[in-house]
Amino acid sequence: MSKQDDSILDIIKKRRTTKKYLKINVEFEKINNIIDAGMWAPSSGNVQPWKFILVQNKEKKEEIEKAAFHQEWLSSAPVLLVVCANVDKTKRYYGVRGERLYVVQDCAAAIENMLLEATSLGLGSAWVGAFDEGELKRCLDIPDDIRPQAILAFGYSDGEMVVPSKKEISACLYFEKYGEKEIKRKGLFPVGEHFKSAGKTVKQKVEEIKSKLFRKQ
């Protein structure tokens, strides 16, 4: 299925964590598109605190692998992208909350954009958060006021990805307050009764209800 044929939800559901890559270089146009997608993520006050370090050199990728607690598959990815945050910039505007939370949220939004764009371009990807921050900063000459947030891997996947199990929406959704599983108000479309499966969209559920009502008439 081409990128044009996929809905956003299709792309979200197709994304997988890839740890095995073909030995094929990734076209720079695709890398550029991935980074561009990250740049268009929302950020607190539009501060855009992110910085990206693109790594394709074999020796440098091996250094990053060591900093990531020797995750051996990591250096086999054709492209690594280290996502960093300019913490001081956000802290100036939002204080401690900006330093400890907003920069993390901002970079996470950029990361997810990039993973989804990679999926739409036919690439596999992985989001790695387990690494020794000090060691990673040393091997990439990252300044003191910049904090690495994640290591991303990109490349053409070698093998078919297994579809993971996901919880049903009803297991995660509450109404009006935490823990409330029932919707209180009465109406034509009692939404709470129809958030049962992640496999069906709200639109599909509404159409089913309408169909049943029309048959009764």
Image (cartoon, rainbow, N blue to C red):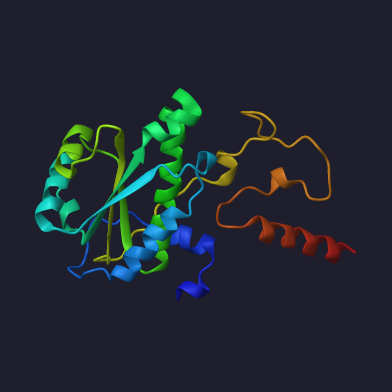
| Left or right: 196 in relation to 94 | right
Image position, residue 97 (x, y; %):
47, 26
The residue lying toward the viewer, choosing from 126 and 90, is 90
The residue lying toward the viewer, choosing from 72 and 106, is 106
Query: Which of the 4 quarters of the picture holds residue 134?
Result: top left
| x 76%, y 58%: residue | 209
Q: Is residue 50 in view from this perspective?
A: yes
The residue lying toward the viewer, choosing from 25 and 180, is 25
| x 31%, y 52%: residue | 126
Q: Is residue 118 in view from this perspective?
A: no
Report the residue that reaches farthest toward the top. 96
| Left or right: 168 in relation to 109 | right
| Left or right: 38 in relation to 77 | right
Quadrant occupied by the N terminus: bottom left
| x 43%, y 58%: residue | 37
Question: Looking at the image, is 147 positioned above or below residue 30?
Answer: above
Question: Looking at the image, is 58 positioned above or below residue 190?
Answer: below
Image position, residue 205 (x, y; %):
69, 57
Image position, residue 169 (x, y; %):
57, 45
| x 52%, y 74%: residue | 5
Quadrant occupied by the C terminus: bottom right
Query: Which of the 4 quarters of the picture holds residue 130?
Result: top left
Report the residue that reaches farthest toward the left. 59
Please count the marks in the image. 0
